[in-house]
Amino acid sequence: HFNGVNLGRDLGSSGRGPDGMTTLRPMLVDDLLHFNGVNLDSFTETFNMAFYFNYLTRWPECCVVAEAADGSIAGYIIGKAEGQNEDWHGHVSAISVAPEFRRTGVAHQLMEYLEEISEKMHDCYFVDLFVRPTNVAAVTLYQSLGYVIYRTVTGYYSGDEDAYDMRKPLPRDKDHHSILNAGMRITPEELHNG
């Protein structure tokens, strides 16, 4: 439990993979050595160990794995809380699901978990994430969860590919200020400067 949010819950019938039920649990340092089977596609960003250690140290409640019945990692999510004032939000820094567990509800449950932590533990206004427009399956998933394309960041991925900055207002953002003026195009410099 993190402040009343149950981590050891079953994912339910939508969380079934090839080996049966999967459950969410806190990410452990040892898990970092077992991500290879999950980080196999061209859409998944793989970061260095310092990146993962930073998240596990600063935002452990935002780092969870979906564990299959056999103990293997079906997927994971790494996030954080950041921003100021009405820009205070949860951010999905990385989410990945092993190929054999895709389309089984694992990604949905991981996203739902981070949204719940962002709302109930951090009192955020919204959750956001960045995704490649070419990752149509992910964009479709996020839209089905209530995310909107807030803006496009041109050349975000190594200057070669744009990113959608997708957002989902949380209950604290009653008037949906976090998605006003959706549809803008900005540069990475504009993103980091304000």
Image (cartoon, rainbow, N blue to C red):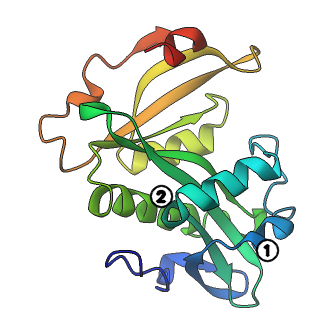
* Drawn side of residue 16 relative to residue 117, left or right: right
- Amino acid, disc 1: Asp
Res 134 → quadrant: top right
Q: Where is residue 100 in the image (x, y as percent from the top left)?
A: 76, 69
Q: Where is residue 144 in the image (x, y as percent from the top left)?
A: 41, 49
- Amino acid, disc 2: Met
* Drawn side of residue 41 relative to residue 23, left or right: right
* Drawn side of residue 76 relative to residue 45, left or right: left
Q: Where is residue 19 in the image (x, y as percent from the top left)?
A: 72, 87
Label 1 to label 2: alpha-carbon separation? 22 Å
Residue at 29 percent of width and 28 percent of height: 179
Observer able to see residue 187: no
SS label for mark 2: helix
Mark closer to the observer (1, 2):
1
SS label for mark 1: helix
Which numbered dot is residue 155? none
Residue at 64 percent of width and 63 percent of height: 76
Observer able to see residue 69: yes
Foreground residue among 105 and 116? 116
| Residue under pointer 1 | 30
Q: Where is residue 174 in the image (x, y as percent from the top left)?
A: 12, 41
Image: 158 above or below 27? above
Residue at 77 percent of width and 20 percent of height: 158
Foreground residue among 108 and 33? 33
Going by the picture, which residue comes out furthest to the left?
Answer: 175
Residue at 51 percent of width and 17 percent of height: 191
Which numbered dot is residue 111? 2
